[in-house]
Image (spheres, rainbow, N blue to C red):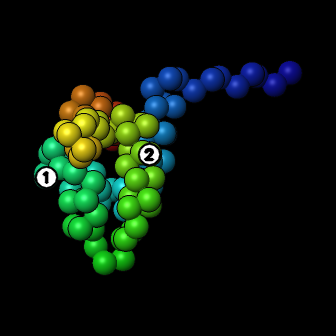
Amino acid sequence: MPKPKAEPARSDIALAQLCKALGNTVRVTILRYVLEHPDCIGNEILLHLPDDGPHAQSTLSQHLRQLREVGLLEAYSDGAAVCYRVSSERIGWLCDELEALC
């Protein structure tokens, strides 16, 4: 009789979701920019993406949404602007999880 498959640990699922979100070079570029420029707004991010990056606000918004959904980015309102910063707790968790793989 075959052995039943074990369910992945909750942390493995979270790590896979983070890796999937970072599986797009534009999102990695966005994350790097926000790390270097905390509390920046979406338009600043859009202006500093490489020439081959997204040039539509709607495309950037989708990338930002995916990074927020996995907890890598935090967003808050400053008047009419939405500002972004990297979640130090979540990026620290990601670094720890990746280190544990080595």
Q: Quadrant of the C terminus?
A: top left
Q: Would you call the spot at circle 1 few (<14 residues within 10 Å), some (14-19), or many (20 or more)?
A: few
- Measure the C-alpha gap from mark 2 to mark 1: 19 Å
Residue 66: numbered disc: 2
Provide residue 87's location: percent of width, then percent of height. Answer: 25, 34
Q: Would you call the spot at circle 2 few (<14 residues within 10 Å), some (14-19), or many (20 or more)?
A: some
Examine the rendered structure and indicate whether residue 3 appears above or below residue 47: above
- Residue at the spot 37% in from the left edge and 71% down from the top edge: 55
Provide residue 49's location: percent of width, then percent of height. Answer: 27, 68
Q: Amino acid at mark 1?
A: Glu
On screen, residue 66 versus residue 78, left or right, reads right
Between discs 2 and 1, the one toward the N terminus:
1
Residue 36: numbered disc: 1
Kindly tell me whether residue 22 is visible in this rendering. no
Task: Indicate the quadrant where residue 4 lies.
Answer: top right
Instruction: Residue lying at the far left in this picture: please name it.
Output: 37
Task: Indicate the quadrant where residue 1 lies.
Answer: top right
- Residue at the spot 38% in from the left edge and 39% down from the top edge: 68
- Residue at the spot 28% in from the left edge and 64% down from the top edge: 46
- Residue at the spot 40% in from the left edge and 53% down from the top edge: 61
Provide residue 56's location: percent of width, then percent of height. Answer: 40, 67
Secondary structure under badge 2?
helix
Could you say which is closer to the camera, residue 83 or residue 21?
Answer: 83
Examine the rendered structure and indicate whether residue 27 appears above or below residue 54: above
Could you say which is closer to the camera, residue 78 or residue 91?
Answer: 78
Instruction: Residue lying at the far bottom in this picture: please name it.
Output: 51
Kindly tell me whether residue 82 is visible in this rendering. yes
Q: Amino acid at mark 2?
A: Gln
